[in-house]
Structures are given as structure tokens and as C-alpha cells.
Amino acid sequence: MDKTKTQRLGLPNLGLGVGLRSKHYSHLMHNDPVIDWFEIISENYINNFGYSRRVLEHVAGMRPIVMHGVSMSIGSTDPLNLTYLQQLKDLANFVNPVWISDHLCWTGVAHVNTHDLLPMPLTLESLEHVTERVNRVQDVLQRPLILENPSTYMEFHSSVLHEWEFMTELVNKTGCGLLLDVNNVFVSGSNHGFDPEFYIRNIPHHAVVQIHIAGPTDCEDYILDTHDQSVPTPVWKLYRLAQELTGGVSTLLEWDANIPEYDELVAEVGKARQVLLGDYPDVPVYRSPYLNAVSNPVDHQLQITNG
Amino acid sequence: MLFQTPLITSYKLQMAELVNIQRWLTSIMVKPGSLAEKVQRADQHYHLDHSAVIRGTDRMSPQQKIGIYARGYIARLLECMSAEFPAVKYLMGEDLFETFAKAYLIRAPSTSPDLYDLGKHFPAFLKASQPKNKVVGNQTFDLPVDLATLERAIAEAARIPGLESQIPDTSSEPDIFHLFGDAGIHPSPCMLLLYLQYPLIDFVRAVQHDEQPDAPPPAESYVVVSRKNYIVYTHTLLPWQWFFLKGLQSTGSYRKAVEDAARSSGESTDSIMADLVLWLPIAENFGYVYRAL
Ligand SMILES: [Fe+2]
């Protein structure tokens, strides 16, 4: 660890957290959250003035909140969506998040939003493009942007940088933070044949602010980031490595489809404590013979919940 | 300084390539057709060769890799459409629903950061998809349109700004202002009024409870959807009630709303005024209207 640089950009280690999902609204309105902190999908609350916002207000009164977005499209060649950034800022004024994150990706172009996290060609031009946009976003938000490595399923011939090199350069040039998704490193590493450990050893550890863990799906020819399973053993191993190298950062379990009951969710993220002691749960990567698994599931954002 | 010019030019050139690659991939994802057709069309249109853009591996060709994104795009957004329109899906059956939802996504790809905007125009799309030579009186096609309209209204009423944050709840306080004409009665900002050809509220509720209801026979239905204290209410109104609320929404005037209700329902203003005395507290309780001076 580089002791000369401020660890986690000076942001706190919040402990163990889970995503705030509508399935658990009723439980959380009547029970202690038990876990340390929550991550919200920002877009789920931006134009939502109904019960979701009431729950968010309630939960934010009890635990720290982090805002995690999926639509900034920082790598897109479309102009930055300033309306969206303002909405993000307004939501931040409402929930007072500990930080705001999004992904190193683009979601569409020519104003189309595919609602997917699409990979960038990792070129020097892309780096320059994203750098300029991260700087502008940080100027608007008046805080460092925390960027997550996405799961990717294809690589570009034109790429001249590895993703960990791209992330490192981006941190150096913008002072942004990293949301290290160790499941995504595992997924992308499996899909592209790089060593996930090498990736994790070669990012700037002082800039890692948060870690994501999740359970992917093995579709035989590739691994898909489905967020619908228990965290498998290899992802837990990467998690422990990352925690050792960073000196300890906030941990968040992502579970977005087949979402379990709240207690089960809390128990799953709680396994992180044993993992840090070297005790790994014995969980194979879930294998699906079906091709209908969905990466990056988003429909949980639309479930209508009444009081 | 001299050497900077070619560098900038090269950067712009490379940026143009990034623009082109992003347009190319987006078009493959959102356009119709088989994967091979879509890739071929995009290659031609954007003067790219997908196998020179995307790296293949031993296990997967470049086109197969692109296919993961193309398939994921449709599957992901179909799940969103299913989440917003469960009753339409139940009515049409999965295959027909997916056919319409896919056609809709191709016609109107999302342009919003907000997924909630995705289904906004689905009812209008279904309506526009009605056969042109539809026999008047054959209302079978109006049923999915009405159903989509109602489900969309329920989704909207659950999210749009309402009364919760601004108005203290006064409904339990005795108040006789409404006896005297223009009485500080306002329509709730999250009240939506629908005129439907079918009575569909029970049908939607049954589908939400995983029951298997039969589609109702046609009967005109005056529906209100609103929210109060974070609970969404969906009710059928009497025509005069519906026209009163509609008038209140469009004119902002209690007196004009009463006149509208009388004109449209064929009842006298006196009888509507008398009925309002009994009904307004109910309308307040369900968050159709609120009182403010
Ligand atoms: Fe993640």
C-alpha cells in the first residue's frame, strides 16, 4: 500500500452493506437494518416521489447511503447529459450520500440508452475522452466520482491498454476513486483470459473506495454478470486479496434478480467476516444450461410497491 | 508547437472512430433482425468489419460476443416491460406480448436515463398497432390498449410528485368550506383520470395477486388513479364524479367543475352540489383532491 497517498480518497470504510431494493421496503420500514450501510441505484429515485423516496428518507435516517448510478455514460461520445447530472446533484442534496459512483462504460449514443454497461475500446483516445468527462462531472458534482469496472464480454482489437492500466491512468489524471467489483474482474478475466489476481494487484489501491461482490452465472462459453446467486468461492478469494491490498474498504453485496429475503441477504454479505479470517464458503460458480440469463438485470427498478 | 497540429488531427480522427464504433454497436443492439443480419447491415452502414473491431477467442467468434450484448439488450428490457405491464402480458400471453413489446422497443428505443420512461408510450403504440380496417364495435383490440393505459397510470401515480411532502393531512378535521362554492378544493397533482371501454380494475388487481381472471365484457368505465400517504388508489367513479374531477383539473375552479359535471353527466348543478357534500370527504381521503386556502 502506498502510504504517501490518502487512503480511499479520505472517505470512510463503511463496513458491510447491501443494495436497497423494493422487495425489502416493508421490512426496512419496520425493522432494524442490521447491516452497516446501503447503496441505492440513483436512477430509481431521481424522478420518484412516491413510497420509494419515503423509504429512502427513512433508511437514510438510520444508515449511511451511497449513490450508485447506471446512466452517466461517462464513455459515450454523446455530450454529457447535464440534466441528468443536475438531477443527480438534487438527489444528493436529498440523501446526502457518502459518495457517488457509476461505471467505466457507455450506455448508448445518438441519445439512445440501451440500459446496458457497454465496454470502451481501451485506447489513448478513449482515455483522453473519459478523463475530460470525469473532470467535468467532478466539477459539477463538487466531489470525486467513483468509477466501477464493468463486466465485459468482448474486447476491441484497437485496445492498447489493459483495463487495470486504463483505470490506473484515469485515477492519476482525474483523482477519481475506484469501485472495485471483484466479481466483474472475475467475470471479465474468465471471458478474456487474464488473471484476475494480477488485475487486482495492479490497480492503485489507495484510490479504491468500495468493493462490489456478487454471484455470476457460468453459461459454458462465457460467464455472465447476473447478480442472482450466492458469491462463489473464487470471487471471495479475490475479495480477500483486495481487502488486504487496500487496507480495508466498504463492501457491498449486489443481488438484483431472484432477490432473497432480507435476512438471507444480510447473512450472505456477513460471510465476508469469515472470508477475511481465511475461511472461504465452498460455493461453485452457478452453471446455467440456458441462454436466457440476463446480465446486469434492471427490472427490479420498476417493481411497483405500495405502502 | 508545430508538431501539435497533426496530434490534434489524429486525436479527432480517433474520436471519429470512437463515435463510429459506438453508433455501430448501438445500431446492432437496437435494430430488428437476426444477429447475422444486424451485424452485416451495421458493418456496411458504418464501413466496419466486425471481426476487425472485436477480438474473437478460441471459444467464441466476434459475432457471438456481440450476440451476448444484442441478446441481453432485448431480454433485459423485455423484463422491464413485463414488470410494468403484467396484466397486458397475462391477457396477451407471453409470446404475443413479447412480439408487441419487441416491436415497441424497436420503434421507440429508450432515450432516457430513467427506465421508468421506457413504457410511457406503450399504450399509444398498441393503439397505433390496431388493424386499420378494424370493424367498428369490434373492441377486442381496445382491451389491451385500455389495460396498458391503466397499468401505465398506476405506475405513474406511484411515482409522480404528490401531496405527501407539501400538504398536512387535514381530511380528519371537520370543515364545511366545500358547502360554499369555490372552496379551496384542488385536484391532487398525482391524480390521473381515465375513460376506458372495459372495467379493468379488478382484472389488474387479480393478476397482481397471481390469480387467473377472465377478461371482462366491455362496459364504459370512469377511472381515477391517485396516491395518498404513499398508497396508490384505483377506483371506478360515477360519471358526474369523474367529470367534476376532470373539470377541476382543467379549469382549477370548483364552480366551473360543478357546471362541467352537470353538463357532461346530464344531472342538475343542485343535485351535484348536494352529492358533493357527501362525496368530497371521500375524494379527499383517497387523495383525489385536497383543500388549501
Ligand atoms: Fe458492480
Image (cartoon, coloured by chain):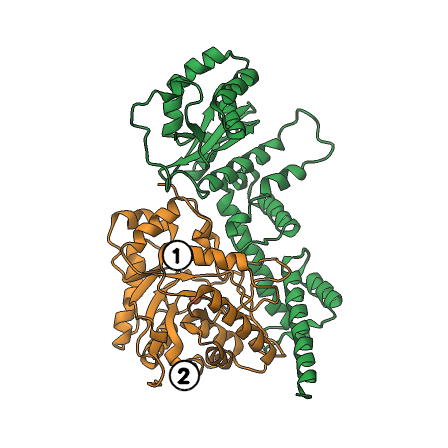
Chain colours: A orange, B green
Residue A159 image position (x, y, % from top left): 59, 79
Left or right position of B61 against A40: right
Quadrant in the rendering for residue A282? bottom left
Which residue type does callout 1 highlight?
Asn
First in sequence: mark 2 vs mark 1 = 1
Q: CA distance from mark 2 to mark 1?
A: 36 Å
Labels 2 & 1 near each other (Cβ < 8 A) = no
Residue A1 visible here: yes
Residue A116 image position (x, y, % from top left): 54, 61
Judged from the image, the secondary structure of the residue bearing numbered disc 2 is: helix
Q: Give the camera-side residue of A112 and A12.
A: A12
Left or right position of A51 against A14: right
Residue B164 image position (x, y, % from top left): 37, 40
Tell me the tag on residue A93: 1
Q: For the C terminus of chain A, which image quadrant? A: top left
Relative to residue A302, is residue A239 depicted above or below?
Answer: below
Q: Count residues near mark 1 (Cα–Cα under 10 Å), then give few for <14, some for 14-19, many for 20+.
A: few
Q: Residue at x 55, y 49 (%)?
A: B118
Judged from the image, the secondary structure of the residue bearing numbered disc 1 is: helix
Quarter containing ligand 1? bottom left
Q: For the N terminus of chain A, which image quadrant? A: bottom left
Quadrant in the rendering for residue B211? top left
Q: Give the camera-side residue of B188 and B4.
A: B4
Relative to residue A278, is residue A250 depicted above or below?
Answer: above
Mark 2 belongs to chain: A
Q: Residue furthest front?
A: B293
Relative to residue A159, is residue B229 depicted above or below?
Answer: above
Q: Which residue is mark 2?
A: A201
Q: Residue at x 32, y 23 (%)?
A: B175
Mark 1 belongs to chain: A
Q: Nearer the viewer, mark 2 or mark 1?
A: 1
